[in-house]
Image (tube, grey):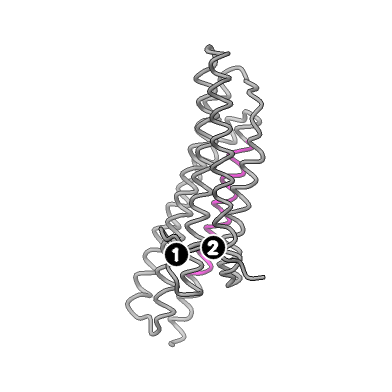
């Protein structure tokens, strides 16, 4: 393996990690802006979404260059998985932007209190994303496998929140638009958990060579 190839591959990994950090931060800042009704902070999240878009373009360019000269099958797998992770991270950024847009809209109207435990839903989704990225960095496919079943818990919490909000809207028809924004934020968090699951599946493929996407393979965790 040439020194230049190793340098490019290392640059690719570092850009992925920087992109991951930015994506996680964007989601956290968007959620705080929504909770605190801070339109100014939400606007900054939206403005900085172009950073993730730029990361994805750069990562694709580096990956294409690397694919042309990857000497080993393991390198090919790392590069293709890295491209998929980059795409998922860009989509996480899109979800953060969606939350921020709702925060700006919500800040213009009186607050509502439908008693939704959004912090739990957000915490689960963000922990899944963080664990997925840590499993990638730490070469831990078993840790990645353990993330996948947690997506069902996020789905269940999202359904519970939706049901509660629908019932709340029946009792408060004057606040339907505001409640729908909360539903939108919950859906964005559910989608972030889906992207975390995608990354976890990619990590399993990268380090074990098994493509478990769309499969009915039982999720086993090493003890």
Where residue 8 sits: x, y (%)? Answer: 45, 75
Query: In the image, is residue 115 above or below residue 24?
Result: above
Kindly identify the residue that appears in the image at 57 percent across and 61 percent down: 133
The quarter of the displayed image where residue 128 is located: bottom right
Query: In the image, is residue 213 above or below residue 171?
Result: below
**Relative depth, front residue between 152 and 34:** 152
Residue 135 is left or right of residue 57, and the answer is right
Badge 1 is on which residue? Answer: 212
Query: In the image, is residue 84 above or below residue 210?
Result: above
The span picked out in magenta is 12-32
Badge 2 is on which residue? Answer: 219
* Circle 1/circle 2 CB separation < 8 Å: yes
Where residue 198 sits: x, y (%)? Answer: 47, 57
Kindly identify the residue that appears in the image at 45 percent across and 52 percent down: 90
Where residue 219 sits: x, y (%)? Answer: 54, 62
**Residue at the far left in the pictured view:** 68
Q: Is residue 5 magenta?
A: no
Kindly identify the residue that appears in the image at 58 percent across and 52 percent down: 150
Category of crowding for the residue at label 2, using alpha-carbon neighbours closer than 10 angstroms: few (below 14), some (14–19), many (at least 20): few
């Amino acid at each position: 393996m040439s020194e230049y190839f190793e340098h490019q591959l290392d640059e690719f990994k570092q850009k992925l990690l920087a992109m991951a950090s930015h994506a996680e931060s964007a989601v956290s800042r968007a959620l705080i802006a929504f909770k605190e009704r801070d339109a100014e902070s939400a606007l900054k999240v939206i403005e900085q979404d172009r950073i993730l878009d730029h990361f994805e373009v750069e990562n694709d360019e580096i990956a294409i260059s690397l694919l042309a000269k990857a000497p080993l099958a393991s390198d090919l797998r790392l590069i293709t998985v890295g491209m998929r992770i980059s795409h998922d991270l860009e989509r996480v950024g899109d979800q953060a932007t969606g939350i921020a847009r709702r925060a700006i809209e919500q800040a213009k109207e009186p607050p509502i209190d439908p008693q939704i435990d959004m912090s739990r839903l957000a915490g689960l989704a963000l922990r899944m994303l963080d664990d997925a990225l840590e499993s990638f960095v730490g070469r831990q496919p078993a840790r990645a496998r353990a993330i996948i079943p947690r997506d069902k818990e996020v789905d269940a919490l999202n359904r519970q929140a939706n049901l509660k909000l629908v019932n709340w809207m029946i009792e408060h028809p004057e606040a339907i638009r505001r409640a729908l924004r909360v539903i939108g934020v919950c859906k964005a968090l559910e989608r972030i958990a889906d992207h975390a699951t995608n990354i976890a599946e990619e990590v399993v493929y990268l380090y074990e060579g098994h493509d478990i996407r769309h499969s009915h393979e039982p999720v086993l965790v090493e003890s």
